[in-house]
Image: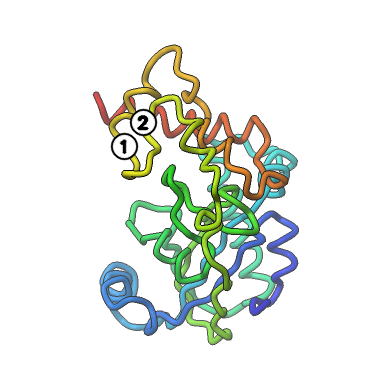
Amino acid sequence: MTLPGAADLARAGLNLQAVFAVAELPAEMAAGLRQEFDREGRFGQLILLGHGGRRLWEAVEASGIASEHRIDDYSVGVVDAWLARHLPGHRHRLVYPGDYPVGLQSLGKLAGWHHPSPFMVGINAQWGTWFAYRVALLADTNLPPTAPVAGASPCAACTGRPCVAACPAGAVGEAGFDLAACIAYRRQPASRCRTTCQARLACPVGTEHRYCEAQIERTYALSLRMIVERAG
């Protein structure tokens, strides 16, 4: 691992870690970050932290934090403590969580964490779809950039395509993902996908890392609330 104190982050649940040189990011992304957060050019690196598997949820539960956005608040608190302990004196700016559209999936692809799946959730061979992005920050550090995780999408070798058959909305198919059909089905009172995703559950990759039922329900309940609010 390239990060000092990487084991501390992993014990707290942030076990996916990557460092990028801002100058080597895609030009549009780098320009947007500088315009929004770093017009003076103080920060040469972007640090991306995520989690894979159940450890983060267990740590959040054990912490007793009870805020509305408790996973975000917990993750930012962990990172603040990590920075103070292992990178004292270095300046940083939090990019995510926040309202800025940083392009987390694009960063995930650069890190080798993310491959597209038929049901529009990132997937990789180790964690399946059971991982997420938690914190992104700009820093004036000079850490060794992280080599991307090598490996092809596990979907390329999947012959049964169980996710396609499992989707009760018919939104997952060979022609692509039908977002409108997914949203319409999730909004139905008797939907089997109000607080979960049947296609995701049917995926055989990384099932040993599947989130517990409480985490799955919380994640999809939040997304359903956003769907309802946007529809007015």
Q: Which residue is nearer to you in this view: 200 or 53?
A: 200
Task: Name the kind of residue labelled 2 in the image.
Answer: Cys
Per the image, the residue denoted by label 2 is 182
Residue 62 is left or right of residue 21, and the answer is right
Residue depicted at x 57% and y 73%: 150
Quarter containing the N terminus: bottom right
Residue 100 is left or right of residue 7, and the answer is left
Could you classify mark 2 by the number of other residues whose Cα lies within 10 Å: few (under 14), some (14-19), or many (20 or more)?
A: some
Q: Percent x, y for residue 8?
A: 73, 65
Distance, label 1 to label 2, CA atoms, is: 6 Å
Q: Badges 1 and 2: C-beta atoms under 8 Å apart? A: yes
Residue depicted at x 51% and y 54%: 155
Q: Under tag 1, what secondary structure?
A: loop
> Residue 198: which disc?
none
Q: Percent x, y for residue 49?
A: 56, 63
> Residue 178: which disc?
1
Residue 230 is left or right of residue 106, and the answer is left
Residue depicted at x 31% and y 71%: 29
Q: Which residue is nearer to you in this view: 213 or 84?
A: 213
Q: Which residue is nearer to you in this view: 141 or 201?
A: 201
- Above-or-below relation of 69 to 195: below
Residue 217 is left or right of residue 57, and the answer is left
